[in-house]
Image: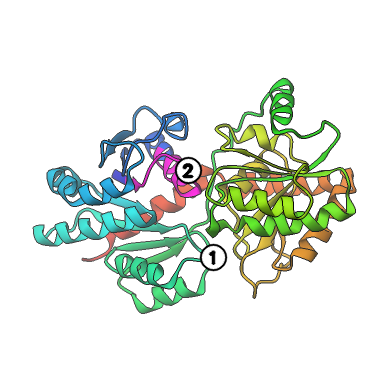
Amino acid sequence: MNIVHVIPAFTKGGAERVAVDLANAAVANGDAVAIVAAFHVPEDLLLCDLRDEVDVRYVARSAGSILAAYLRLLPWMLRNREWLLSRDIIHCHLTFGSLFGAVATAMRALRRGNRPRIVETYHGIGAPVRLPLKRFHMALAATHDGFIAMAEDEPWSRFARDHPKVRSAMIPNGIALDLAPPTKAASDAYRAEAGIPSNALVIGSVGRLVRERRPEMLMRIFERVARSIPDAHLLMAGSGPEAKRLGIMAAEAGLAERVHLPGLALRPALPLSIIHLYLTLNVGPITGIAALEAAAMGLPLIAFQANDAYRTGPGDWIYSSSDPSAVAAEAVRLLGSVEARRALAARQHQHVLAHHGAEAMFRAYRAFYEKILGSPD
C-alpha cells in the first residue's frame, strides 16, 4: 500500500506524533510511506524519530513559515500531481492537511480516477475551536472519503450522520511502547535545572502550552493542591503562547517559586521521570499522547475533564472531573499515599500496554484504509 501523511511540521504535537508512529508502523509492515510537511523545523524535534525508509517532502523551503506553505500549496500539488495521484491513501492531519486533502480530491475528480482515497484524522476533539474555523474544517472534511475521530464528540458524530458518504470511525490514539527512561543522573540534572527541590512532590504535565489544551485549568487545580501540601510543586514542561499567562497566574497566586515552566522538552522522558502524579486533560474517556507516554513509563494519572457533561464511569481508566476542586482533592489524596499512587500506576500501565500501543492503532487504521479502498466510488 502507498500511503502519504500530511502534517504542518515535525513538531512535538500529539497529531504529529500519531502521524510519525503510523508511518513507522506502516514501513515495518512493508508499505511505501511518505510524509508531506508544510515547512521545515529543527530535526531534533520529531524528525529524528522517523524511520529512514519514510520519504519526507516539504511544501515550503523556508523554515517555520506556515503562511508560505499555504501560498505554495496549490503550485506544489500541481507540480507533484502525478506522484500524488499514484498513491493509494492520502492521510490528512490538522487544518493544513485537511485543506491538502480537499485539493487532492478536486485533482482526482479532474482525472476521473478513484485513487488516492483521502482520509482525515481530526485531532481537535474537545478543544475550544472557534465556530467559523470548525465550520470551515467540516466543509473540508465533507470532501474526503474517510473521517476518523480520536474520541467521541457530538458535533462530529452529527457530521458523520449528515454525511453518510464519508466513512467515519473512532480510533483512539496509540504510542510506541519502547520508551527508555533516563538515568538517575539525567533526571536529577533536569530537576535542578527546573529549580525543583529534591524533596518536593511534583504534580506535572508535558505538552504544548496553547489555549486549546486549557493549561490554565491545571494551574487552578494546583492552586488548590498547594494549600493542602506545602511541599508540592507544579511542573508544566512545554512551550507555547500561554506560558507568559501561566507565569502571571502563578505570581498572582503567590506560587511563583512552586510553579515551574522550563520550556520545550526535547526528551519528554526527562520531565516524566521526576513527576509523582501526572495531570492531564481528558475529553470523555480519551486522553492525549503525552499522558499515554506517562502511563507507559509507570506514572499515575488523573485528569481535568473538558466535557462538562461527562461523568467518570467504572470502565474509565483515568479519574477525571470538570470540577477543579474535585480533581485537586483526588490529587491531594494520591500525593499523600505512595501505596495508592503505585497501585493506580500499575493498573494504568497495564491498560496502556493492552490497549494503546502504536501497533494496535496501526492495525485499526490499516483496516480502515482497506475498507475505504474497497468501497464503491
Q: Residue at x 17, y 42 (%)?
A: 83
Q: Magenta includes 242?
A: no
- Residue ID for mark 2: 17
Q: Within 10 angstroms of label 2, few (less than 14), some, or many (20 or more) residues?
A: many
Callout 2 amino acid: Arg
Q: Nearer the viewer, mark 2 or mark 1?
A: 1
Where residue 272 appears, x then y in whole percent? 68, 37
Q: Is residue 107 above or below residue 33?
A: below
Q: Quadrant of the N terminus?
A: top left
Amino acid at the residue labelled 1:
Gly
Left or right: 298 as drawn, with respect to 232: left
Mark 1 highlights which residue?
Answer: 126
For residue 112, say whether it is visible: yes
> Is residue 16 part of the magenta span, yes or no?
yes
Question: How far is disc 2 from disc 1 in space, using C-alphas?
Answer: 19 Å
Q: Is residue 10 left or right of residue 239?
A: left
* Residue name at image x 74 percent, y 40 percent: 275
Indicate which disc, 2 or 1, sits on the residue closer to the N terminus.
2
Give the quarter of the image for residue 308. Answer: bottom right
Q: Is residue 260 above or below residue 332?
A: above
Whether 118 is drawn above or below 247: the answer is below
Instruction: Please tell me which residue lies in front, 174 or 354.
Output: 174
Q: Is residue 317 visible?
A: no
Residue nearest the viewer, comparing 247 with 335: 247
Q: Position of residue 237 (x, y in %)?
A: 63, 41
User: x, y (%) of residue 305?
Assistant: 66, 64
Relative to 315, residue 290 above or below? above
Which span of residues is magenta-colored? 5-23
Estimate the x, y position of residue 105 in percent, counting from the top left. Answer: 21, 60
